[in-house]
Amino acid sequence: MQPRDPFNDPFTGEESGRSIIELRGISRSFGSQEVLRNVSLDVRAGETVCLIGESGCGKSVTMKIMASLMQPTAGDVLWNNVPIKDRSDEELVRDRLRFGYLFQGAALFDSLSVFENIAFGLRQNTKMSDEFLAELVAERLKDVGMSPASAQKMPSELSGGMRKRVGLARTLALMPDIILYDEPTTGLDPIMIDVINTLILKTRKRRPVTSVIVTHEMSTVRKVADRVIMFYPLSRLEPGQPQIVFEGTPEEAFASEDPQVSQFVYGEAGERMQELALL
Amino acid sequence: MIEFVQAVGDLALFATSMLRWLCRGLPRRSVVVECMYEVGVRSIPVVLITGMFIGMVLAVQGYQQFHLMRMETRMGAVINMALVAELGPVLAATMLAGRVGSAMAAQLGTMRVTEQIDALRALGANPIQYLVVPRFLSCFLLIPLLTVMADAIGVAGGWVFSTQVLGVDATYYWHYSTEYVAAWDVFAGILKSMFFGAAIALIACHRGFNCGSGAEGVGQAATSSFVLSFVVILVLDFFLGMFLNEIYWTLWPGPSSFV
Ligand SMILES: Nc1ncnc2c1ncn2[C@@H]1O[C@H](COP(=O)(O)OP(=O)(O)OP(=O)(O)O)[C@@H](O)[C@H]1O
Ligand SMILES: [Mg+2]
């Protein structure tokens, strides 16, 4: 990693509230299946945005498009107010390193041990001594509540929740400025959910980071979000209604009168139950 | 038809970007070494066994015909020529495509569907450089050695079986072999094998990268990688054979005959 000049750094710096990631009119389809239609949103420096919405509505796709791991069918992605298509390949790779991405399925490298997984980004992008590396990895493991002994395990020997936590440790190891968490607490027990929520808050206190969190966990929304964005699946959208059905603070989300929002945040199926012919 | 053209074009693009990354430098040494071990060392047993049996099979089959014509001593020339020019390279390549190629396609396919390839990109590693370049190099550089092994053990197997079991005169067996099989033939076989190795690695990695979703997609990637590699090996063998013959006649014009 290049040394960062805090005064001339496009991604951090004093001026918070500047746009870090902006989606402009993003659409994405897979074959004939349309997943995102004309989605625009803005993530500002230093804030924590939670993306919520029912399963399959395109949250993970949106996150991948934000990190430029997937191309939209139409629309522009801007990082720091510059469209990513105006960046050269090298600039894109360099700027993508400012992002940390926790994948929904953790996406640990099967052929590498837990240690090597967490050390991967550091080995790839820095020239660190092995002792320093070992120290950092141990620290990251401790952050996510795993024992140092698990470092030598292979991903196939871990439980689902442990994989998720190793994935989180790997994401945070490179000290990213922008962290995209795809369901960081799914599959964890209630205690561990609290540990991870606290870790997300702690990460933000330690240094200026911008985070986007996809989650189904309302405790995460309550505890860490500055802003909530709710997506709706295209198939059930009223004609002409935008796909983002709610945008506001968590308090506003929990106080919302709109049934689409309140039923979701309070976990009530409402008329969906009849729709699905379960009653 | 359009799909076919598209697939070939896509593979060509894939190969070009692989070559670009190859020129930009290698990934970490441990990655390459591990891959070479898997491709090279672990393929030796199967190549040796199949090579030896092919040599012996040729001896068994050839003996019937040559014995009728009372030309058993010429068997060596035919067996060894067939081995070094065609069977050695093709056999080593087929084994590599089956053993290593489909495993690569399945592995990369699994990495695709479990988002590990995206994770590589997110962590600043280029998937082509990190995954494809070492596999390409391993296949491309090690298949000549595997071919030489298949050639050698096939020649030995044919020789042992012919002289020890079928009772062919060893001196003449070698005499006609060396007279007919030139260094060029061995070289041509090895050269061909390098093309096979390159094709196997590219096809396998390309199939893996473009794997469909789920376990089904992974299985399909593995199978289609083998089938496609095998077809390409035989097609390449045909065209390279013709091309190398042309070169041979250009370099050394003059009659040559089967004594
Ligand atoms: N690589 C892909 N190929 C084809 N279809 C895809 C692909 N990725 C996502 N989809 C489709 O896009 C839709 C949205 O997927 P996405 O993963 O974004 O959902 P999600 O909102 O993250 O849901 P969940 O909360 O269950 O994770 C799904 O219907 C899925 O079938
Ligand atoms: Mg998802």
Image: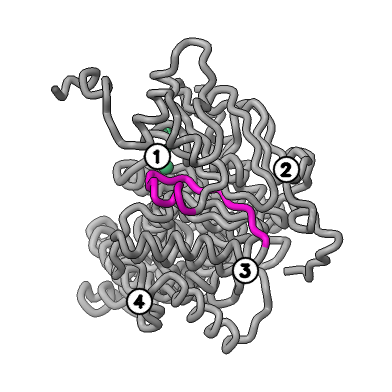
Magenta residue check for B147 = no
Is residue A7 in view from this perspective? yes
Residue marked by disc 2: A19
Q: Secondary structure at mark 1?
A: loop
Is A221 a magenta residue? yes
Q: Chain of mark 3?
A: A
Q: Earlier in the sequence, mark 2 or mark 4?
A: 2
User: Quick one: label 1, few (<14), some, or many (20+) residues within 10 Å?
Assistant: some
Q: Residues within 10 Å of mark 3 (few under 14, many from 20)?
A: few
- The quarter of the picture where the C terminus of chain A appears is top left
Disc 2 with disc 1 on a shared chain: no
Residue B246 is labelled as none
Separation (CA) of disc 2 from disc 4: 40 Å
- Label 2: how many residues lie within 10 Å, few (<14), some (14-19) or many (20+)? some
Q: CA distance from mark 2 to mark 3?
A: 21 Å
Q: CA distance from mark 3 to mark 4?
A: 29 Å
| Residue type at numbered disc 2 | Ser
In the rendered structure, which segment of residues is drawn in magenta? A208-223
Query: Of residues A29 and A51, which is closer to you in this image?
Result: A51
Mark nearest the camera among 1 and 4 is: 4
Return the mark for residue B212: 1
- Which mark, by number, is residue A153? 4
Residue B94 drawn at (x, y percent)? 38, 56
Q: Which mark is residue A206?
A: 3
Q: Residues within 10 Å of mark 4 (few under 14, many from 20)?
A: some
Whether callout 2 and callout 3 share a subunit is answered yes
Residue type highlighted by circle 3: Arg
What amino acid is found at the position of numbered circle 1 in the picture?
Answer: Gly
